[in-house]
Amino acid sequence: MEIVNRMVELSGGLGKLATLLAQLRQTPPERLDGVVAKLKQQHPASEVRAAFIELLGVAPIEDFPTLRAVFMKHFAH
């Protein structure tokens, strides 16, 4: 929740975070790697990371291994 609050402070609202989260939620897990890479080119990595963390909170548990791998590749540096 702290990340969401910080995003609200930085962006002035939840619109961008909600939009990014919606894009991630509509993406099949096997395509997330490419979609995250594309989103990082179009948006600040911190915003994409915040949306991805929100995705972790609502994604089915069976998708977690794939989500973990994508997160580690794109955000764990």
Image (cartoon, rainbow, N blue to C red):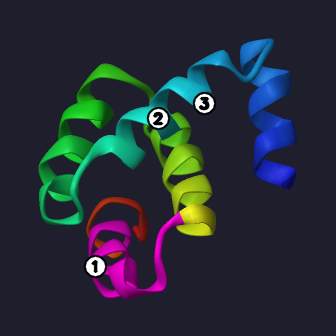
Label 1 sits on residue: 69
Label 2 sits on a secondary structure element that is: helix
Look at label 2 and name its amino acid.
Ala
Residue at the spot x=26%, y=69% of the render?
A: 73
Q: Disc 3 marks which residue?
A: 17
In the rendered structure, find residue 22 and report the number of the disc placed on it. 2
Could you tell me the amino acid type at mark 3?
Leu
What's drawn in magenta, residue-wise? 59-71
Which residue is at 49% across, 67% downward? 59
Q: Secondary structure at mark 3?
A: helix
Residue 20: which disc? none
Q: Which label lies toward us, 2 or 1?
A: 2
- The one nearer the camera, 76 or 57, is 57
Viewed as shown, does residue 31 lie left or right of 10? left
Q: Position of residue 61 (x, y in %)?
A: 47, 84
> Residue placed at 28% from the left, 68% from the top?
70
Left or right of residue 44, residue 56 in this image: right
Occupied quadrant, residue 67: bottom left
- Within 10 Å of disc 1 (Cα), the crowding (few <14, some 14-19, many 20+) is few
From the viewer's perspective, is residue 54 above or below residue 9?
Answer: below
Image coordinates of residue 54 in percent, x first then y, are 61, 54
Where 68 falls versus 21 (above or below)?
Answer: below
Question: N-terminal of the two: label 3 or label 1?
Answer: 3
Percent of width and height locating residue 77: 40, 68
Mark nearer the N terminus (2 vs 1): 2
